[in-house]
Amino acid sequence: VIGELCGLIAKLCLLQAAEISLVHIAKQEVRAKFGQCQEGAVSSLLGMMCDAVVDLDEHARLKKHSPKLSGLLIHREGKSLEGDRLDAYVQVCEDMGRLEALMSRDPGSDFGGMMPSMLTVRLRDSLGGSLKVA
């Protein structure tokens, strides 16, 4: 009888630990989904307000091609901007400083520095002209 009782107590402890673990995992998933929804909403809003929306890595390189930005820069069709540094197109030093400030934000803010942000800069198009974009 004592052996059975110890076995039941052990099973209850394991079930309690499993429940705590599952609750923890569920909370993490909910937080992640909420962050994705919030980031998606901000990106959509930026898409309505801005000339082009791009996703940059930590070195200010475009993570993927942006057809809108490519069109604004008068690039030939088929030329991908993926991997290009945004600062390669920035024309004015003061704009470069704002881009650098945006890229060096505290990583602890805005969902780990991943929250979309708006930046207005003057870029150089493929013909050498200046274009102010947001």
Image (spheres, grey):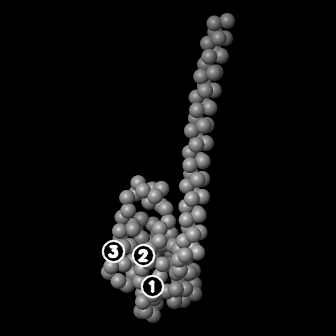
Q: For the N terminus, which image quadrant?
A: top right
Query: Where is residue 130, by image quadrant?
Result: bottom left
From the top left corner, tell me how far across and down residue 110 is, in percent.
46, 58
- Point out the frontmost of discs 1 and 2: 1
Q: Label 2, label 3: how many angstroms apart (C-alpha)?
A: 15 Å
Location of residue 106 with respect to 79 vertically, above or below? above
Q: Is residue 63 visible?
A: no
Look at 42% across and 56% down and name the residue there: 109
Q: Which residue is mark 3?
A: 97
Is 121 left, or right, of 46 in this rendering?
left
Which mark is drawn over residue 132?
A: 1
Question: Disc 2 designates what residue?
Answer: 85
Q: Is residue 12 visible?
A: yes
- Residue 24 vs 88, above or below: the answer is above
Query: Residue at horizontal 61%, vertical 12%?
Result: 6
Q: Residue drawn 54% across and 89% down?
A: 76
- C-alpha separation, residue under disc 1 versus residue under disc 2: 17 Å
* Residue 44 position in % (x across, y down): 59, 69
Q: Please name whichever residue, 53 or 81, is drawn nearer the observer in this view of the structure.
A: 53
Work out whether mark 1 precedes mark 2 in sequence or the reverse, and give the earlier one.
2
Is 123 on the left-hand or right-hand side of 25?
left
Q: Using the image, determine if residue 31 lies above or below residue 63.
A: above
